[in-house]
Amino acid sequence: MIRSILNKATYLLFIIGVSSLFSCTPSKNESDREEILYDEISKDLKSNILPFWEKYSVDKRGGFYGALAYDGSPIVDADKGCVLNARILWTFSIAYQVFKEPQYLDLANRAQHYFIDHFIDKEQGGTYWTLKSDGTPKDKDKQTYGIAFAIYGLSEHYRATQNQKSLDEAIALYHCLENRVFDSENGGYIESFTKDWQKPNRYGYDGDGIASKSMNTHIHVLEAYTNLYQVWKDEGLRKQLTGLLDVLIKKVYNPRTYHLMHYFNDTWESLGDVDSYGHNIETAWLFNEASMTLGDAELIRKTNKIAIEIVSTTMEQGMNPDGSLIYERKGKYFQRDLSWWCQAEAVNGLLDAWRISGNVKYMDAAINTWDWIKSNMIDYKHGEWYSTVSVAGDADTKGLKASLWRCSYHNSRMGFRVMSFKDMK
């Protein structure tokens, strides 16, 4: 049912590729616990997360609001971000595929029209980073991260609708990255450019502005290329997807610490000492998704091994006893607040580790994290999840539910992935 996340062919290849790693059959009790987990997460997706975005996010002036307050009320004059809108496009495109409900198709088409009409730079190529609330361009710089999410959302819309315009635009953006952004000498993709593709005064959308390459951008280009390749079996794309996965494994993943390094210069020298626990555990399953999509059994075995290393280390170093996942470590400083997206990716990564290892500790940990989410992060009054919970356990009851970064993507994707796993049972 959910081909974009885990189709039957790649799942079977996945099982074959990792058969040497496990021969465990879950007990009836374990299967029951798994069913309960899947049912609860699926219910939260269908009855809480998607209805919130359907009810509050639509901007009658066009597209979707750039920000929503904690209770869903719109911040009418907020800028509209490329990433938020691409993620909304992805969310409702896959929601229509899963539930076949017409309102999700309407919202996916609305997102597609608005994104193509307003975010894509028709003259210079690529996408604008932000628009003003009225839909006119504001920040015209080209961020590779944003372009990657545009590919991700548009390719998913094509899968949902077979709208050729969506595929054509996704392919054009892919070629834009390859022609403008790909570093043919050192591998990987440069972080950002000016509107006309010159070197910017400051690299990136975060960090110190000196890193010309970043882990975060590369894992989401990987995600975008994986999604595009599932609907467009182009040999050039396959080559670039394979090369990108190789770069991430050899340049970004640290096999001594089982972490991903964060910021780099052109030649892949690491710039800083950062462990981002949410990104680490997210990348663990993104690696597996890419290798399964490519259908390379040896590569599948390699990414399975790395995934277990990453997930186990993240559990040990970043996970609290109650199942919550802290944000990151920078040098000797630990940012211990509990972000919504980190918890969603913890469940994704833990369930993926359970699937490839058969080790019940990962399922136990996923259940533990979900139980924490249910008790601490879901906003039962206004809908959706709180964006942050403090170290002391206090939810930020005033934090935005939508912004340039806060979106419908991480926790809804957790729900869709859980439903895909359930379909395979």
Image: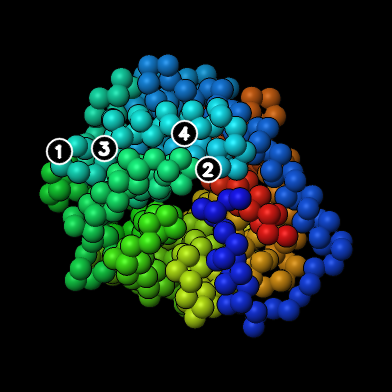
Q: Residue, x 23% and y 71% (percent of image)? A: 186
- Kind of residue at badge 1: Glu
Element marked by disc 2: helix
Whether residue 275 sits left or right of residue 338 in the image: it is left
Q: Which residue is mark 1?
A: 123
Dots 1, 4 in contact, CB < 8 A: no
Which residue corresponds to the image point at 13% horizontal and 44% vertical from the top-left? 196
Q: Secondary structure at mark 3?
A: loop
The image quadrant where one finds the C terminus is bottom right
Identify the mark at residue 120; answer none if there is no mark: 3
Report, in whole angstroms, how far the alpha carbon at label 1 lies from the one at label 4. 25 Å
- Type of the residue with mark 2: Ile
The amino acid sitting under disc 4 is: Ala
Which residue lies under the disc numbered 4? 108
Nearest the viewer among 396 and 105 is 105
Q: Which residue has dot 2 on it?
A: 94
Question: Which kind of residue does numbered mark 3 sit on?
Answer: Ile
- Measured in 3D between alpha carbons, the distance from the residue under mark 1 to the one under mark 3, in whole angstroms, is 9 Å
Q: Is residue 302 at all visible to an observer of this figure? A: no
